[in-house]
Image (cartoon, helix red, strand yellow):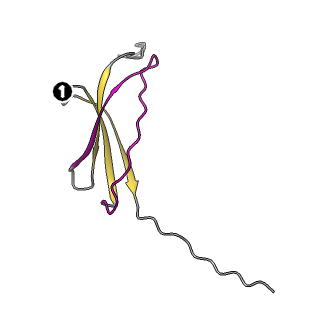
Amino acid sequence: ARGAKLVPAPATTVALRVLGPTGEELSEQILVTDDMGSVAASFDTPAGGSVGRHRLVLVANGTDEQLAEEVVQVAAFEPTSSTFDWP
């Protein structure tokens, strides 16, 4: 609604789902929002895992009600190589 006041949702249990490029669920973490309605989490991609676009989906815990979604790009690590010639 226009002019409606947005308020945080403290102490709300949510689930963060990490979905791989083909839609497979790689992880689900149950989190509780802080006093500002925020959550923080980390996820390590599996060794040899898929590269490409992964979806982070935040849902109300125990439901499929989607609250937020973000897409992140996962790329293969390629170390750089450098050669230095010293006099």
Q: Position of residue 45 (x, y in %)?
A: 36, 53
Q: Secondary structure at mark 1?
A: loop
Q: Residue at x 38, y 44 (%)?
A: 43
Q: Is residue 70 magenta?
A: no
Magenta stretch: helix, strand or loop mostly: loop
| Position of 4 relative to 79 (above/below) | above
Q: Residue at x 18, y 27 (%)?
A: 63
**Which amino acid type corresponds to the residue marked 1 in the rendered image?**
Thr
Q: Position of residue 44 (x, y in %)?
A: 38, 49
**Nearest the camera: 49 or 66?**
49
Q: Position of residue 38 (x, y in %)?
A: 43, 25
**Nearest the camera: 13 or 21?**
13
- Left or right of 14? Residue 36 is right
Q: Residue at x 41, y 61 (%)?
A: 75
| Position of 32 relative to 56 (above/below) | above
Circle 1 is placed at which residue position? Answer: 63
Give neighbour class at mark 1: few <14, some 14-19, many 20+ (Cα, 10 Å). Answer: few
- Left or right of 10? Residue 21 is left
Image quadrant holding the C terminus, namely: bottom right
Q: Is residue 29 magenta?
A: yes
User: How many numbered badges does the structure rendering display?
Assistant: 1
Q: Residue at x 39, y 56 (%)?
A: 74
Residue farthest to the left, as pictured: 63
- Left or right of 63? Residue 42 is right
Residue 84 falls in image quadrant: bottom right
Task: Find the magenta span and give its range.
Answer: 25-49
